[in-house]
């Protein structure tokens, strides 16, 4: 789906849902990082690519709103309600951000060729692939999480991630043309190898 060469292991969602509080905490941090990453591209490349300022500021606003929504779910009790054996379940907190092994490996894989591809092109293509992989995770969560409220929520987010994949791919193609398409093919191969190796656990990417 969405240019990914390796589907997400469908057994991931069971491993992830086993600790829903940890999964939503990781997801909330992913949304914050997505907003920060979009703004970091603006901060670094606004002079070279002014056409990206407005769509990426809009994206950062949307990712921040997603963070707010995930955080609200985390604190609302919709997570704690699934822990049947606790009489008075405690609400999970946000916790501190952890390094994202998938994102770090993908960024490293993109720079493995040295300075052959423009940094902006790689930032856009890596962002597109992260959105595509998140879209897969949210699709599985929409289909398999036990809570109907969360299923509906993740169906909506799945659609957002598909749109964000198209946004990043479109920005890359608008500026880099055929080079963007070739780079997406190449990095999608490396992304597939990374995704295949990820341990199964309560994180959005792995
Ligand atoms: Fe998001
Ligand atoms: Fe996104």
Image (spheres, grey):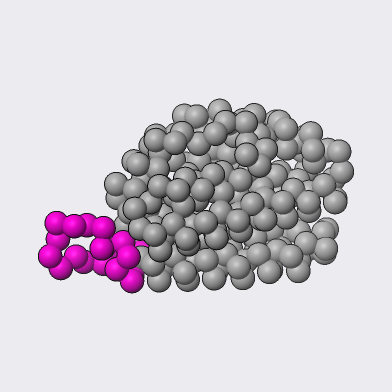
Q: Between 185 and 120, which is closer to the camera in this rendering? A: 185
- Please give the name of the residue rendered at 39% of the width and 59% of the height, measured from the top-left corner: 148
Split into 4 quadrants, where in the image is the C terminus? top left
Residue 56 x/y as whole percent: 70, 63
Split into 4 quadrants, where in the image is the N terminus? top right
Q: Is residue 206 left or right of residue 60?
A: left
* Region rendered in magenta: 75-94
Residue 87 x/y as whole percent: 12, 65
Q: Between 202 and 88, which is closer to the camera in this rendering? A: 88
Q: Is residue 93 above or below residue 106?
A: below
Dividing the picture into quadrants, the one containing residue 77 is: bottom left
Residue 142 x/y as whole percent: 46, 52
Residue 80 is a magenta residue: yes
**Magenta region, mostly helix, strand or loop?**
loop
Residue 49 is a magenta residue: no
- Please give the name of the residue rendered at 67% of the width and 50% of the height, measured from the top-left corner: 165
Q: Is residue 74 left or right of residue 61?
A: left
Q: Between 117 and 132, which is closer to the camera in this rendering? A: 132
- Please give the name of the residue rendered at 67% of the width and 55% of the height, measured from the top-left corner: 163
């Amino acid at each position: 789906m969405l240019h990914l060469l390796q589907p997400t292991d469908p057994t991931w969602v069971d491993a992830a849902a086993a600790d829903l509080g940890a999964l939503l905490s990781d997801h909330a941090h992913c949304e914050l990082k997505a907003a920060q990453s979009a703004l970091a591209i603006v901060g670094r490349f606004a002079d070279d690519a002014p056409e990206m300022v407005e769509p990426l500021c809009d994206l950062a606003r949307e990712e921040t709103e997603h963070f707010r929504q995930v955080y609200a779910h985390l604190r609302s009790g919709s997570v704690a309600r699934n822990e049947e054996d606790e009489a008075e379940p405690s609400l999970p907190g946000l916790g501190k951000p952890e390094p994202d092994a998938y994102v770090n490996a993908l960024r490293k894989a993109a720079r493995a060729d040295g300075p052959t591809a423009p940094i902006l092109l790689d930032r856009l293509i890596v962002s597109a692939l992260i959105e595509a992989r998140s879209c897969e995770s949210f699709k599985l969560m929409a289909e398999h999480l036990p809570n109907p409220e969360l299923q509906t929520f993740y169906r909506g987010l799945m659609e957002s991630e598909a749109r964000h994949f198209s946004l990043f791919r479109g920005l890359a193609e608008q500026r880099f043309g055929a080079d963007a398409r070739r780079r997406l093919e190449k990095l999608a191969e490396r992304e597939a190898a990374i995704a295949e190796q990820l341990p199964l656990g309560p994180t959005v990417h792995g």
